[in-house]
Amino acid sequence: MNEQPDQTLNTAPGETHPGDIPSGDTTPRVATVLQVLPALGSSGGVERGTVEIAEAIVEAGGRAIVASAGGGRVHELARVKAEHVTLPMDSKNPLVMYNNIARLAELVKRENIDLIHARSRAPAWSAWLAAKRTGCAFVTTFHGTYNAGNFLKRRYNAIMTQGDRVIAISAFIAGHMRRIYGVPATRIKIIPRGVDLYRFDPAQVSAERVIKLANDWRLADGMPVIMLPGRLTRWKGQAVFINAVAQLERRDLRCLIVGGDQGRSEYRAELEALVEQHDLGEVVRIVDHCDDMPAAYMLSDVVISASTDPEAFGRVIVEAQALGRPVIATEHGGATETVVEDQTGWLVPPGESEPLSKALAHVLGLDETQRAALSEAAIANVREHFSKQSMCEKTLEVYNEVLHERGRA
């Protein structure tokens, strides 16, 4: 560890905590935190969370640095006064990963970094060894179950369990880590992903935005809208959803599958053929991309997650609830922690179209009073348990705990 006074990150700007200044020290130095991930070019939860935590570090008086291969979100770091260092962190080439150890170690020494937070496996290997080389604190976030089908895969994945603290994005993931990798509960901190309560606030989504999106998607007035967001990949359950819609035997609906195929053109063709097979061409539409998801949720009468494999967290379902939308999700993984059955949404067995179809029929039959009560409960659920503010505060608490422990070592 760097020979410096105790490092700390406050959970709010200007706030101090007992124990932040060790006996004999009068000038605590705020921490410098380096987050590492492959790239910042995606709209995924890992990339968004990295920027959000960087902003929280800066607002708490610390210094935030991110190392990645770059991408479209780099400008967001500059906006929140964080720094970016471009390194080939997206490479899985063993030689590049090995060379990244020295690159990161040099960065730690040059910038006086106190803690490295790794968010993905390939960069985590380099970051862990760089942290050991420099005596830097090391934290990881375990974002998914990963493919653990053989010993080599499990060994590769296990790097995400090597942090002084390991952040799990759900209790489901925490249980997975304990069961598969034997991580002791004392090193695991469950911090669910957080929703930006300003961006996903019904009062902030104007009618003009919703109308514009409805016009762009050529949605007729007065027809209920059912939406399943998520990239086109088999385990997201789009085929189950299409079959469930067919079983409704209704034509007065518009069902949107919102997500790009990311090169999975054969799977998209399968879905289009299934739509044609059920004669649902006017009912079901695949939309490649949406730049205004809050408006998309607001124009929906029900939002679906039909994943056949368990979601590590399930961001879509939480965002939809934040906007007061009824949700239906499959009963496994993170969804069981974010949906309050019969109060904020419904859970159905994974991979089965008939229960999903029955749940859809039930939601579409709710009257205005029932929908209003559900909307209020859903918004309250997210505000209490899944806010971005809570996620950031708890993450900074983890940083503080680790830094203080290191200072006492």
Image: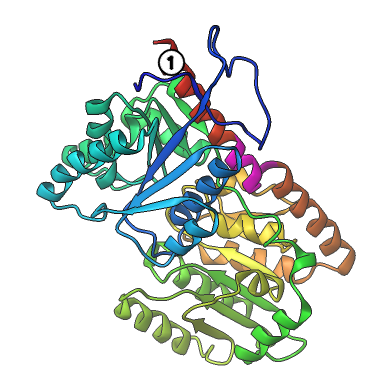
Q: Front-most of 197 and 57?
A: 57
Counting every numbered tag in the picture gives 1
Location of residue 153 with respect to 164 vertically, above or below: below
Q: With 110 as the anchor, is 189 left or right in this view?
A: right
Residue 115 pos. (x, y %): 39, 32
Location of residue 130 with respect to 83 vertically, above or below: above
Q: Quadrant of residue 162?
A: top left
Residue 185 pos. (x, y %): 45, 22
Which quadrant of the rendered structure holds the C terminus? top left
Q: Front-most of 26 and 376?
A: 26
Q: With 344 as the anchor, is 336 left or right in this view?
A: left
* Residue occupying image coordinates x 43% and y 15%: 407
* Residue occupying image coordinates x 45% and y 89%: 276
Q: With 116 as the anchor, is 228 left or right in this view?
A: right
* Residue occupying image coordinates x 52% and y 45%: 53
The residue at which mark 1 appears reads as: 407
Which quadrant of the rendered structure holds the N terminus? top left
Q: Front-most of 47 and 253?
A: 47
Question: Would residue 168 be counted in the magenta stretch?
Answer: no
Residue 349 pos. (x, y %): 54, 54
Q: What amino acid does circle 1 point to?
A: Gly
Whether residue 212 is visible to the viewer of this picture, yes or no, is yes
Q: Residue furthest top?
A: 23
Circle 1 packing at 10 Å, graded few (<14), some (14-19), many (20+), is some
Look at the magenta stretch and give its main secondary structure.
Answer: helix
Residue 311 pos. (x, y %): 47, 51
Whether residue 311 is visible to the viewer of this picture, yes or no, is no
* Residue occupying image coordinates x 52% and y 76%: 257
Q: Quadrant of residue 291?
A: bottom right
Location of residue 378 with respect to 163 vertically, above or below: below
State the extent of the magenta-drawn residues as a range: 385-393
Q: Residue furthest front?
A: 27
